[in-house]
Each structure stands twice: as C-alpha cells, then as structure tokens.
C-alpha cells in the first residue's frame, strides 16, 4: 500500500452527512493528527466562510481550525487576485462565503460596469441578478463560477445547486464560465499549494465520483472513494471517473494502510 503524506478531504458525505457526523471520520481524523499527517478540508460549498466550517466541525466533535478549510470561494478569489489588481470592479452572485473571500482581496462590488462576474450558490437569486450578470458578461466581463454542482443536498431532498444558476447565466449571456471547484483542477492546485505536499504524495478523498474522484483524475493525483455518501459501488460500472482506491469508510481505509 502506498504511503501518502497529505490528504485533501471532502466534507458532506465524507466527514458528515447533513447534520450528522460520520463516526468513522472522527476516528480517522484523530489517527491523522496522531501520525502528524497534514490534511485540508476542500469543499465546493461557496456559501460559508472557513471559520464557520471549522466551527461546525468542532461542534460535531472534530476540533478544526479555519486554516484547515479551503472553499471554492477562496479558490475563486485566489484566481481573480492572480489576474486582476486590487479594487477591481466585480459583480457577485453568491452568499456570505463568497462575499467575504472577495472582500479580503479588496474587490469593489458594483451593480454596473463590472470587469468580472463571479457566481456561486445564491438562495436569493432573482431575474434581476440574472439580467445584471448576463449584461455585464455580454459587455466583456470575465465570467467565473465557484462550482457547477447541479444539486444541493438538503433535509428536503436535492434542491437546485449553484450549477443550476450558472447554467442560467451561461444561457443568458452566451458565455461559458471559468469553473473553479471540483472536478476542475484549479481548486485542487490551490489546495495543494496551501497543504504543502507534492502531487505524488497526496490523496484526495471523497464520496462523489463526479466531483471528488473527477478532481483527482483531472489533477493527476491519487483518489479514494468512500461509500458513505453520494456514490455507490455499482456506480463504478458506468462512471467515467475511476478512483485509485475504494473503501467502505475512512477507518476501513486507515486499517488498510496499517496492514
């Protein structure tokens, strides 16, 4: 069994399911800390801040610091910061996590004349926001999307995700966005830079073949599919994305590593 020196971990379906922590995940994180193996939680969720994610995990019994969390909003801000000066005019469709990440790099929020349109999950999305975004893009603004997840798991079942909003903006503007989140490589590259381990010695872990395992394939790093969330073992038969490793849960994986 190959030894990995760093882990990129998905959250929902991997560490917890909705409001319920996965017990094997708690034990696995404890083992990583005992072994001094660095890890980073990497999530497509653009709506919240790393501080709130860390607090949520801590409340579930997994003590977490904000710098152990990397969101698609943070990736979008990093992508923009590399290409535009501070104070760039931006039109944003999103929630607190995205607005906070953009404020941190000094973006100026404008209603018209934006140089960049950045869109993520927004549960207050309206026709007016759609029209403003499409108009700015048609006038030359770059279009950036935090992620393209089509559905959002909730207590009510699957609700429209940020990908649904992105599709509407792309249709209205006639322009496809640069997508930051998994399965794209951009978010993984930023996360690897933050984690500090090489591509060859890092494992990306998740429950979703399309996003998590796809991100591993697109990024050239090994992946582990855990069967605690979205994807099922039978899905492997028809999936374009195949994991390097498969485990029932995170502790089964850890035990395999120790064998």
Image (cartoon, rainbow, N blue to C red):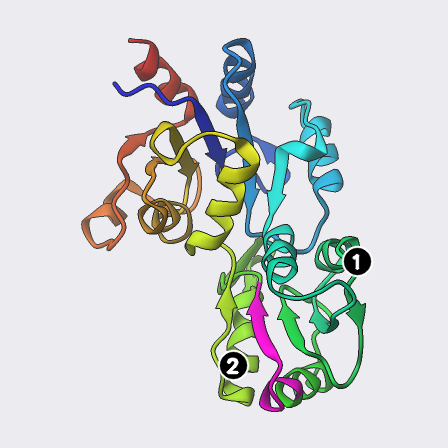
* Residue occupying image coordinates x 68% and y 33%: 67
Magenta-colored stretch includes residue 256: no
Do the CB atoms of the residues marked 1 and 2 lie less than 8 Å apart?
no
Residue span colored magenta: 136-145
The quadrant holding residue 12 is top right
26 vs 145: above or below: above
Residue 162's place in the image compared with 182, above or below, is below
Residue 80: quarter of image: bottom right
Q: Nearer the viewer, residue 237 or 219?
A: 219
Which percent across, then down, holds residue 129?
71, 81
Element type at marker 1? helix
Residue 5 appears in the figure: yes
State the image coordinates of residue 91 (x, y, percent, origin top left): 72, 75
Mark nearer the viewer, 1 or 2: 1
- Structural crowding at the residue carrying mark 1, measured as other residues with C-alpha within 10 Å and reported as few (<14), some (14–19) or many (≥20): some
Task: Specify whether 220 is left or right of 17.
Answer: left
Q: How many marks?
A: 2
Residue pictured at 63% horizontal, 69% vertical: 119
Q: Which residue is mark 1?
A: 103
Task: Check the picture and name the quadrant holding the C terminus.
Answer: top left
Does 222 sit left or right of 75 as displayed?
left
Specify which label sits upstream in the sequence, 1 or 2. 1
* Helix, strand or loop status at disc 2: helix
Residue under the point 27% across and 50% down: 241
Image location (x, y in percent) of residue 105:
75, 55
**Classed neighbour count for the residue bearing mark 2: other residues with Cα under 10 Å, few (<14), some (14–19), many (≥20):** some
Is 233 on the left or on the right of 137, as rendered?
Answer: left
Residue matched to label 2: 170
In the image, residue 54 sits, relative to residue 186, either above or below, namely: above
């Amino acid at each position: 069994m190959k030894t990995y020196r760093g882990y990129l971990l998905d959250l929902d379906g991997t560490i917890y399911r909705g409001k319920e922590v996965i017990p094997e995940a708690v034990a696995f994180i404890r083992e990583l800390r005992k072994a001094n193996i660095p890890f980073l939680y990497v999530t497509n969720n653009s709506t919240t801040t790393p501080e709130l994610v860390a607090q949520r995990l801590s409340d579930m019994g997994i003590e977490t610091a904000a710098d152990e969390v990397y969101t698609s909003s943070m990736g979008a801000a990093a992508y923009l910061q590399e290409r535009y000066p501070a104070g760039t005019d931006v039109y944003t469709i999103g929630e607190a996590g995205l607005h906070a990440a953009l404020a941190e790099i000094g973006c100026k929020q404008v209603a018209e004349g934006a140089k960049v349109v950045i869109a993520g999950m927004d549960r207050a999305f309206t026709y007016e926001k759609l029209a403003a975004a499409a108009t700015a893009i048609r006038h030359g603004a770059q279009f950036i999307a935090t992620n393209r997840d089509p559905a959002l798991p909730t207590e009510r079942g699957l609700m429209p995700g940020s990908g649904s909003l992105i599709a509407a903006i792309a249709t209205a503007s006639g322009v496809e966005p640069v997508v930051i989140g998994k399965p794209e490589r951009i978010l993984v590259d930023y996360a690897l830079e933050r984690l500090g381990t090489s591509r060859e010695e890092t494992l990306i872990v998740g429950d979703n073949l399309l996003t998590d395992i796809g991100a591993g394939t697109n990024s050239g790093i090994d992946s582990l599919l855990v069967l605690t969330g979205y994807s099922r073992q039978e899905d492997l038969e028809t999936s374009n994305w195949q994991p390097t490793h498969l485990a029932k849960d995170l502790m089964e994986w850890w035990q395999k590593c120790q064998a």
